[in-house]
Amino acid sequence: MTRVLVLQGPNLNLLGTREPEIYGHETLDQLHAALRLHAAELGLEADTFQSNHEGALIDRLHERDFDVAIVNAAGLTHTSVALRDALLAIKRPFIEVHLSDPATREPFRHVNFLVDIALLSIVGQGPRGYHLALEEIAERFRGHRG
């Protein structure tokens, strides 16, 4: 069974209350529960992790106990060379997901340190983007194991 890590960056713990006009009303716990259910339906095993701390996200990646990741680095997308380096170092493919489309937002959000190393980038789809990423993983990695 393909193991998927859903890695969530800073401030995503505030989903459901933070700028709902941009990020929606679904909480992170609700999103993660729906993702675990959808993953199981697709024959995938999903684990979720969120931290507001860059080092904790990097440490989680270093565990390498997954085959592929879905990464929403949130604000770290635009600032973190260290997170980029960790994603390259662990040699695990990942799909980048953003609830909104950073390219349509403030100019500083147009910088993206992950897009060129991701298998795919899904933006502006809200929570549906994570489900699309799971479906893409199911297609690409069916039956794969570390």
Image (tube, rainbow, N blue to C red):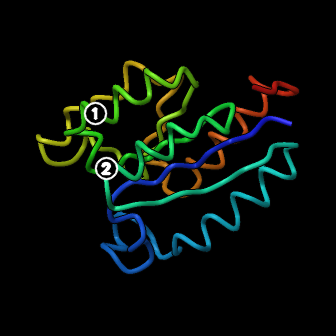
Provide residue 23's location: percent of width, then percent of height: 40, 65
Q: Residues within 10 Å of mark 2 (few under 14, many from 20)?
A: some
Provide residue 61's location: percent of width, then percent of height: 50, 39
> Which residue is found at the position 44% from the left and 77% from the top?
16
Provide residue 45's location: percent of width, then percent of height: 79, 47
Q: Quadrant of the C terminus?
A: top right
* Residue beneath disc 1: 82
- Residue furthest out toward the bottom: 17
Q: Quadrant of the N terminus?
A: top right
Q: Hey, what amino acid is under mark 1?
A: Ala
Name the quadrant containing residue 107. Answer: top left
* Residue beneath disc 2: 54
> Which residue is found at the position 47% from the left and 36% from the top?
96
Classify residue 98 as left or right of residue 39. left
**Of callouts 1 and 2, the N-terminal one:** 2
Q: Hey, what amino acid is under mark 2?
A: Glu
Vertical order, 140 against 126 (above or below)? above
Secondary structure state at the residue bearing disc 1: helix
Whether residues under marks 1 and 2 lie with C-beta atoms below 8 angstroms apart, the answer is yes
Distance from label 1 to label 2 (Cα)? 8 Å
